[in-house]
Amino acid sequence: MKSEGAVEPDDGFVPPFSEAPYGAVLGGVAAAMSAIGTAAIGGLMLLIVADVIGRNFLNHPITGVAEVAARAVVAIVFLQAAAAVLQRRLTRADFLVRRMERVSPRGVCAIEAVFCVCGAVVFGLILWASLPKLAEAWTGAEFFGVQGVWTIPTWPFRGITVLGAAVAMLAALYRAGVELRRFRTLP
């Protein structure tokens, strides 16, 4: 049972443009990236099933599935990270947060804001570490796979990491601001 004066956090992560233009654009970008990540999960599943069928029943495996799968998982994580931040869905002890919220909603807002700032720092460090690797992969024509058998360029995967880390960092900073504004409105 909710009290009448309780302020509930917004469950939707894409606010109306008229209320929060920055949040609406960021939420739209995060939603689009998450949708692409979800489609990539489906594609990866189909690829793995096709490889298993080809390997076990047709004696003809698909070349490069292990390499693509290894890099695709990382890409999918970074495609979906910003949406997870905006939806408050990152891994945490949610049962503890819910218990604390009954006692001190302002305390939970402060904790969430600190958590988001820490997340922004972590994603910023990932971005900082990944940019030079993206530049090297782009200029050095870096590939993975077995040369002469099957290769694929690494820059698209590194680019997704950079894009995902940048958008997740912005999402974490935006979420920290939302939590601080909510902190000020609570009694």
Image: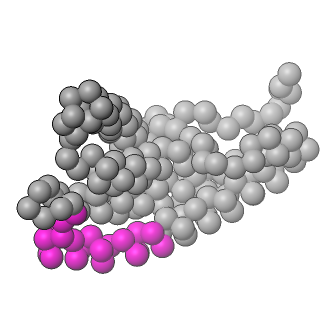
In the rendered image, which quarter is residue 98 located in?
Answer: top right
The image position of residue 17, as x and y in percent, is 42, 38
Q: Is residue 129 magenta?
A: yes
Asked if the magenta segment contains residue 126, the reply would be: yes
Query: Magenta region, mostly helix, strand or loop?
Result: helix
Residue 3 occupies quadrant = top right
The figure's colour scheme reads one colour
Of residues 125 and 30, the one nearer the viewer is 125
Is residue 50 or residue 175 the one in the foreground?
50
Residue sitting at x 75%, y 57%: 110
- Above or below, comparing residue 117 to residue 103 in the picture: below
Position above or below: 53 against 74: above
* Residue 128: percent from left, percent from top: 40, 75
Q: Give the farthest residue toward the top.
A: 1
Instruction: In this rendered view, identify the residue nearer to me: 106 or 125.
Output: 125
**Residue 147, quarter of picture:** bottom left
Residue drawn at (18%, 70%) of the image = 142
Give the percent coordinates (x, y) of residue 89: 60, 42
Seen at 21% across and 34% down, the residue is 59
In this picture, which residue range is highlighted in magenta?
125-144
Could you tell whether 139 is left or right of 85 in the image?
A: left
Looking at the image, which residue sits at the far left? Answer: 148
Counting from the top left corner in percent of width and height, residue 121 is at: 55, 69
The reply to whether residue 72 is in sight is no
For this view, does 10 lie left or right of residue 82?
right
Pick the quarter of the image with the N terminus: top right
Above/below status of 30 relative to 157: above
Q: How many marks?
A: 0
Q: Residue at x 74, y 43 (%)?
A: 94
Asked whether residue 1 is in view, the answer is yes
